[in-house]
Amino acid sequence: MSASLPPSRPVDPTPNDRGPALSEWVGLKWLMGLQGRRIDVARLQGDPDYARCCLDEACACADPALRDYAARLRQRLAA
């Protein structure tokens, strides 16, 4: 079963916040939840290593929508 992507909305990062917005992490949480994987949004926001690990797992899953969404978040996290 392929989950559909949440609508893509531009997020204007502030100079101190260039990573994914809370709403983007919540989207990842829901898409990962559809795959049976629970993730901690607060930890995603505060622990870059945990975020990268979750994104790695999402990028390796069978769901193309989740892989694409995670790839976009990975780019935002690297910015």
Image: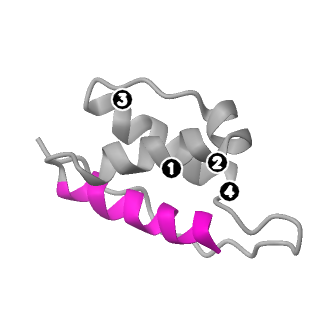
Q: Is residue 77 above or below residue 44?
A: below
Q: Amino acid at mark 1?
A: Arg
Element at label 1: helix
Q: Which residue, given by chain and number where applicable, does mark 1 sit on? A: 52
Element at label 4: loop
User: x%, y% of residue 77?
Assistant: 60, 63
User: x%, y% of residue 30?
Assistant: 42, 36
Q: Amino acid at mark 4?
A: Ala
Q: Are marks 4 and 3 in contact (CB under 8 Å)?
A: no
Instruction: Give the Cα distance between marks 3 and 2.
Output: 20 Å
Picture quarter with the C terminus: bottom right
Q: Are marks 1 and 2 in contact (CB under 8 Å)?
A: yes
The first of marks 3 and 1 along the sequence is 3
Instruction: Find the magenta span and give its range.
Output: 64-79
Picture quarter with the N terminus: top left
Residue, x 23% and y 50% (percent of image)?
Answer: 60
User: x%, y% of residue 68?
Assistant: 31, 64
User: x%, y% of residue 25?
Assistant: 57, 46
Q: Which residue, given by chain and number where applicable, does mark 3 sit on? A: 33
Which of the numbered marks, if any, corresponds to residue 48?
2
Q: Are marks 4 and 1 in contact (CB under 8 Å)?
A: no
Which of the numbered marks, if any, corresponds to residue 44?
none
